[in-house]
Amino acid sequence: MASKGLFISFEGSEGCGKSTQIERLATRFRDSGREVVTLREPGGCPLGEKIRDLLKFDPAGDGMSAEAELLLFVASRAQLVREVIRPALDRGAIVLCDRFLDSTTVYQGVARAIAPDTVASVNAFATGGTLPKVTLLLDLDAAEGRRRAASRKGPTDRMEQEQEEFYEAVRRGYLDLAVAESSRIAVIDASGDIDAVGASIMAALSERLKGECHGLL
């Protein structure tokens, strides 16, 4: 039976503004009376947050192989889907997720050069068929994204320490994926100010959801 909720994911490289736009969209939906669940990947549940720390900050992650990284990301996702996302959708909530399976497709499958079939297989196993209705890809020049990310407060995580070529590969991978899955993925120009990006997001959702949000947009 189809779920009553709505699942929207946000994708993009470092510094593209996903967190800000998720907060804005969540506020809009909540003001319309809907339950909204905001999540991040990896993370979003106790097990996922432990994996997040290992992937991003724990010294034990230094020198991690690409294969181990892939499996840790999808392990977090598998738990998040079953513990949080599916129950939320079943009760009619709107789920907004900062990253989902597309991040693994691009970061590990393209930038880390793991075989695409392998990445697709473990992604499918982890999600068990639970996919976003719409994915918003906030596209930004890689150099500008790194500049923005560097200006944020807090420690630099392991992924943010990659070289420029890595982020160029990530951006190309995302744009290629958006072409391949154009019915689900909407590319949003993230180079403008917050309001301009927000307006583009609302236009993309209105077009792709075709009234499914019952006037919320």
Image (cartoon, rainbow, N blue to C red):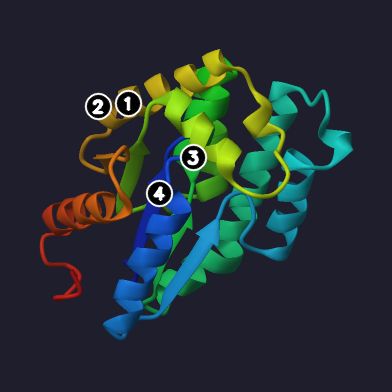
- Whole-number angstrom distance, CA of label 3 to CA of label 4: 13 Å
- The residue at which mark 3 appears reads as 15
The mark lying in front, picked from 2 and 4, is 4
Which label's residue is closer to the chain start, 1 or 4? 4
The mark lying in front, picked from 2 and 3, is 3
Residue sitting farthest toward the front: 151
- Any mark on residue 175, and which? 1
The reply to whether the C-beta atoms of the residues labelled 1 and 4 are less than 8 Å apart is: no
Residue 49 versus residue 161 in the image, above or below: below
Whether residue 13 is visible to the viewer of this picture, yes or no, is yes
Q: Amino acid at mark 4?
A: Phe
The reply to whether the C-beta atoms of the residues labelled 2 and 1 are less than 8 Å apart is: yes
Q: Nearer the viewer, residue 119 or 59?
A: 59
The reply to whether the C-beta atoms of the residues labelled 3 and 1 are less than 8 Å apart is: no
Query: Quarter of the image containing the N terminus?
Result: bottom left
- Any mark on residue 10, and which? 4
Looking at the rendered structure, the secondary structure element under dot 3 is: loop
Q: Amino acid at mark 1?
A: Leu
Q: Quadrant of residue 92?
A: bottom left
Q: Amino acid at mark 2?
A: Val
- The residue at which mark 2 appears reads as 179
- Whole-number angstrom distance, CA of label 2 to CA of label 4: 16 Å
**Label 1 packing within 10 angstroms: few (<14), some (14-19), many (20+):** some
Residue 54 versus residue 89 in the image, above or below: above
Q: Amino acid at mark 3?
A: Gly
The reply to whether the C-beta atoms of the residues labelled 3 and 4 are less than 8 Å apart is: no
Which label's residue is closer to the chain start, 2 or 4? 4
